[in-house]
Amino acid sequence: MYAQMIKTARTGVKPREEMSEQERAFQDKIDAGIKIEPRDWMPDDYRATLIRQIGQHAHSEVVGQLPEGNWITRAPTLERKAILLAKVQDEAGHGLYLYSAAETLGESRDELIRLLHEGRMKYSSIFNYPTLNWADIGAVGWLVDGAAIINQVALQRTSYGPYSRAMIRICKEESFHARQGYHAIMKMAFGTPEQKKMAQDAVNRLWFPALMMFGPSDKDSVHSEQSMAWKIKVKTNDELRQQFVDQTVPQIEYLGLDLPDPNIKWNEERGHYDFSDPDWSEFFDVIKGNGPCNVDRMNARRKAWDDGQWVRDGLLAHARKKAAAKVAAE
Amino acid sequence: MKNEWPLWEIFIRGQHGMSHRHVGSLHAPDAEMAIKNARDVYTRRNEGVSIWVVEARHISATAPGDKGPLFEPSESKVYRHPTFFDIPEEVGAM
């Protein structure tokens, strides 16, 4: 989710007869469900695709802290504040697990962060939308983390061992995020008419951006096929999006809110809800950097990195001094 | 990048008297900070009662290519497992 539009070097899947012996053995391992581990041989494109996907996923966790951090000091109660603080802290942890997974592929964390700050790597489009009021914080936890969980549960079965293990860990913590969000929205939906209106407004605004989190429609995802063959991706964008809609519609109905899309309708034949596509031109525009908050988010990230430089340098200088003193004493 | 903090591998002992287990890694300038960060990152939900940290460069590991020669021989030694031996029921618990 958190990784949209991951480009692979080629479109389509490399046919077996074009593979080298090593590549064939690698594909057989993947087909047999054996996890690939850091020091195992892997095709260069597999490594590069994973670094891009895991890196983008990690950046999303970290940038995702910004829209929520905005509301920590303005949470309506001390309890909600403590909960939001814990959630935002989790996101930092998730970023760290993912950067660690990317590092096992030979790319350093500082390098990934540099690429993000230079605008050469992306993060999920969803975090370029603003959180305007407290209802948005509830809706973000419920819908955005809810969409993330659907993607991440599938990714627990991804073929790269460290990525899969990071996903397992993240999923354990993530359902707290979705539930605290739904709980906050429940309070509002069942509260005063004004609160209910805020809840409705948040759902209306965040619904389509949440659907975009799964990436473009399968027919436009030219880079998915090889990732599916390598089991870097386990389910297609459209499959995951449908699963999200099917799961979320009854949750909206329980709240007594109106559905955010007039075309949402149960389709008996398919056994799924029908729904409207998001506006894909908006999606591509946000990805390109023209969303409502792209500039703010990147400025906040760069400022945090630059402002923290003296702390990182100071701690490293201290550690080196201590290590030198220890060597001298021996 | 030469000014990047070194990588540490983190091991945590869970609640129930089990061995320390590898849970992940993180960057820190020294061991003291690695422990502090590990506490924040890996024990936010009562996951542990004790932490070990080891700088990643100090860990030696088997090569993936040695998997066969190292670990396959034990596959044919089924007699190392107690279930290999049929013991008559009359003998009682063993």
Image: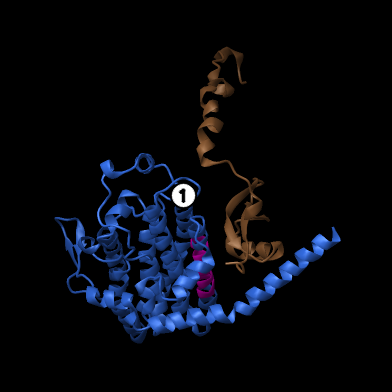
Chain colours: A blue, B brown
Spot occupied by residue A99 in the image (x, y as percentages of width and height): 50, 63
Residue that protrudes farthest toward the right in the picture: A329
| Quarter assignment of residue A253 | bottom left
Is the magenta region chiefly helix, strand or loop?
helix
Question: On the image, numbered disc 1 is attached to which residue?
Answer: A161
Residue A254 versus residue B46: which sits nearer the camera?
A: B46
Task: Please say if A314 is above or below A177.
Answer: below
Say if the magenta span includes residue A93: yes
Q: Quadrant of residue B33?
A: bottom right
Nearest the camera: A185 or A105?
A105
Question: Disc 1: which chain?
Answer: A
Residue at x-position 28% and y-position 69%: A211
The answer to whether residue B53 is left or right of residue B63 is: right
Residue A14, horizontal then vertical, whole percent:
28, 49
Is B44 a magenta residue? no
In the image as oriented, which residue stretches furthest toward the left? A269
Q: What residue sits 38% from the left and 66% below the top?
A: A2
Residue at 52% x, 63% y: name it.
A108
Q: Is residue A145 left or right of residue A310?
A: left
Read off the magenta span: A84-98
